Image (cartoon, rainbow, N blue to C red):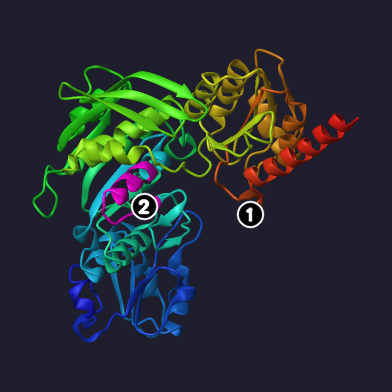
Amino acid sequence: MKANKILFDTYNPYEVDLSNIEIKDIKTNSRLIEKNDLFVAIKGHTVDGHQFIESAVMQGASLILADKHFKKIMDSKNTQQLNIVFVDYTYDYLSAIMNRFLDYPSRKLNVFGITGTNGKTSTANILTQVLTKTGQASGVIGTTGVHTQNCSYPLNNTTPDPLVLQNVFNKMVELNIENMIMEVSSIGLAENRTKETDFSVAIFTNFSQDHLDFHGTMENYLEAKVKFFSELEPYNSRGMENFAIINRDDNKSEYFIKQSKATVLTYGLNKNADYYANNILYSELGTSFTLHHNNQQYFIETSLIGEFNVYNVLAAIAAAHSQNISLENIIAQLKTLMPVDGRLEIVSDTLKDDVAVIVDFAHTPDSLEKALRTLSHIDHNQIISVFGCGGDRDASKRPIMGQIGLDNSDFVIFTSDNPRTESPESILKDMTESLIGDNYRQIIKREEAIHHAISIAKKGDIVLIAGKGHEDYQIIGKDKHPFDDRKIAREALNSRRKERTIKARL
């Protein structure tokens, strides 16, 4: 594509002939540059891409896009003039040029966005399964990567940057995907990563404390979330009605509803919601409830566990129904839902083990409390929980999570999560120094903590291993080390079985 087709509104002080420059691809990583690529120099949190402009040119970049402030540096150098144009802030401009270059791929898809402190991954997974099972080719973008029936690969961020995101959409168009369901993080919204994405449905799950290390205050965090709804237009680019799906039971729901310009549909356990549930029954095998909508009642069965999954299912029902899929068709698919990796995932074997071991991604105060309260509804003897808090992240939630663990568990083992560059000892100190109660111990090494929890559990106990869920690594310092809670738990369960067998023979 000719450069003037995508960079027509840039600042061009050196009068570069954009109509004579061919752009083969757009890249922000100078090490990946090939001949005739456009290199977009991005000033990031830790690295400034402007430092690598000369390297990109040497590797074959035909054109450079830079921030306007870099022009002063260019003017001060007595070097050969580069093919370079400028904008105020390249990162904010990235969505625009990616859409122009790829011919607006999200406009060729039905894009569902899900935001909220907790439940994004589960709701996205449920909705993707429902849409796929009803005959619509669907994919998901989020914490666990990009997934369709025939394509799967990881991502570095829950909500990827504009270059990656628009390339994902373009790939999905090539694969003839109809629906893309994506998790939209507050950080992604604050950084405008979804700018110019043509959403059809925006879903709000809930709001509670998280990411204050990035946003600074709960007010800033809230505004980042609300921005998704205030910017959603009443109709998408194809002239179709857009929908805002709001959790009526959340205490911020009215604010989200007021900020929404799209058609609002609500869900929850509140009778005032458009889609509400009652008569909820829980078991270790799943959940059932009665769905109410437009004065009609529907019986719902799902293999998913717990009240928070009732909310996730309701959100998915409302979103799918908004796209003219019948409730009867949606409900039929809910019976065969597959659980989400690392979300209340049962790793023990009911036929071989005398304890239940469950791995969950809960890493916020709200999600941890909900996970533990969900397990309290299942027949059990005692609940033993194993969890920590991440390093280089919001430290204010550490004592809150510690107390939630004590209040909702019979015994807690505090351990390392992803300590990153912080001392694990200092993280555990933050979690425990103000605790009210003594039903806990600290074991810094996570593998040892998991083994200990499973070894001390009595018959009928539940062991919850929280915080990392689907992750198959642990970040210590700046390095990722292979580590999977589920694998470690299965090893510990196997050791427990062997000990039980030996004791039975004595």
What residue is drawn where x is 31% and y is 31%? 314
Q: Is residue 503 above or below residue 251?
A: below
The region drawn magenta spans: 125-141
Question: In the drawing, what numbered circle is on residue 140?
Answer: 2
Residue under label 1: 480
For the residues marked 1 and 2, what is the alpha-carbon distance in whole angstroms? Answer: 25 Å
Amino acid type of the residue that numbered disc 1 sits on in the rendered structure: Lys
Label whose residue precedes the other's in the sequence (1 or 2): 2
* Nearest to viewer (mark 1 / mark 2): 2
Horizontally, is 17 left or right of 389 in the view? Answer: left
Q: Is residue 481 above or below residue 454?
A: below
Secondary structure of the residue carrying tag 1 is strand
Residue 212 placement (x, y as % from top left): 46, 34
* Residue closest to the far left: 239
Residue 175 found in image quarter: bottom left
What residue is drawn where x is 47% and y is 78%? 55
Q: Quadrant of the N terminus?
A: bottom left
Horizontally, is 499 left or right of 172 in the view? Answer: right
Horizontally, is 293 left or right of 241 in the view? Answer: right
* Residue closest to the far front: 505
Q: Nearer the viewer, residue 328 or 117?
A: 328
